[in-house]
Amino acid sequence: IVHSVDHYPAEDEELRATAQRFQRGGNAANTAVVLAQHGHQVSFAGNLADDVFGQQLAAELARDGIETRYSQIISNSVCPLSCITHNLQSGSRTIVHYRDLPEMEARAFAGIPLAEYDWFHFEGRNLSQLTQMLEQLHRVRVDQPISIEVEKDRPGIEQLFGLADVLLFSRAYARIHDCRTASQLFDQVQTRSSDAMMICAWGEQGAYARTGDGADLYEVAQPITRVCDSVGAGDTFNAGVIHSLLSGQALPAALKYANKLAAKKLQQIGFAQLVG
């Protein structure tokens, strides 16, 4: 639930919102929607609640061309909810999450016909189960790349780095680890990530990457006249990277396209018609 306000409220302030909207969210779901807009056949695998919001979420994914046959419907459950305060002055979004839904288990992932897919993208969470999923995938995959979004500093998340081909870091994660530049972050991570490609979007400063053989790349941010909605901009950037690499583009071109796509997202409300 997104409330737009003309300034960020002070503690104990009562403030009337200028607009309210309900929208589907979630990092992986947002990325899936943008990938589907590029014409990819996309599946979403995760747990879904059986309440009215969970049913609506599944219906909206289907409407956007994303199939959910490998998702698990959890009985007597509540759909996770984020309440977002969207500051119209700066475009920032402040998020309060509520979640009481079990995470997807590795045994459910084992039922997916993995050979049918060309790319696997994971959000770095639910680490005990996700590690098992990645190990399953490594045992059966042929040449399908694996990308992991590393947005938050969850305990033990570093154990995943060596299981990915592409690591997509947030600037927030870098700063939590006292890294003032993406290069500092890459230096920290490289000992754990073997030869993974590392990418970090740095907001208005652009996007940085390091190839598996240690070459650093940088792409300047796209100019933006006004930030309208930053919700999901990082998820959109990730989709731009995945689409570009999956389409055979080199990493510099992937960074440039992902920056362009994220800039477009920042200047519009929601995800509709980002592509084209």
Image (spheres, helix red, strand yellow):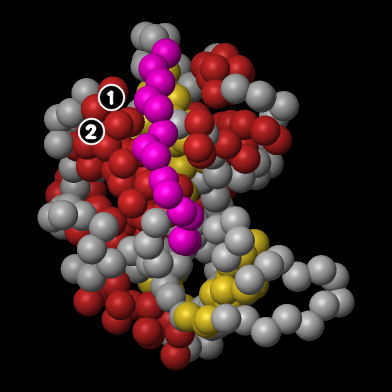
Closer to the camera, 245 or 204? 204
Please, is residue 9 above or below residue 78 in the view? above
Residue at image coords 33%, 64%: 271
Outermost residue, front side: 225
Q: Please, what secondary structure does the residue beneath circle 2 have?
A: helix
Where residue 242 sits, quadrant-wise, is top left
Q: Position of residue 231 (x, y in %)?
A: 49, 60
Q: Amino acid at mark 1?
A: Leu
Confirm or deny contact between disc 1 and disc 2 (CB under 8 A).
Answer: yes
Residue 258 in view here: yes
Residue at image coords 22%, 36%: 244
Residue 242 in view here: no
Crowding near the residue tagged with mark 2, few <14, some 14–19, many ≥20 C-alpha atoms within 10 Å? some
* Main secondary structure along the magenta-highlighted residues: loop
Q: Which mark is residue 245?
A: 2
227 magenta-colored: yes
Outermost residue, bottom side: 52
Tally of marks: 2
Q: Which mark is residue 251?
A: 1
Image-based side of 138 in relation to 48, left or right: left
Q: Which mark is residue 131?
A: none
CA gap, disc 1 to disc 2?
Answer: 7 Å
Q: Amino acid at mark 2?
A: Leu
Q: Position of residue 40 (x, y in %)?
A: 16, 53
Tell me where the magenta segment starts and ends, as one range.
Answer: 216-229
Q: Please, what secondary structure does the residue beneath circle 1 have?
A: helix
Closer to the camera, 133 or 180? 180
Please, is residue 64 above or below residue 135 in the view? below
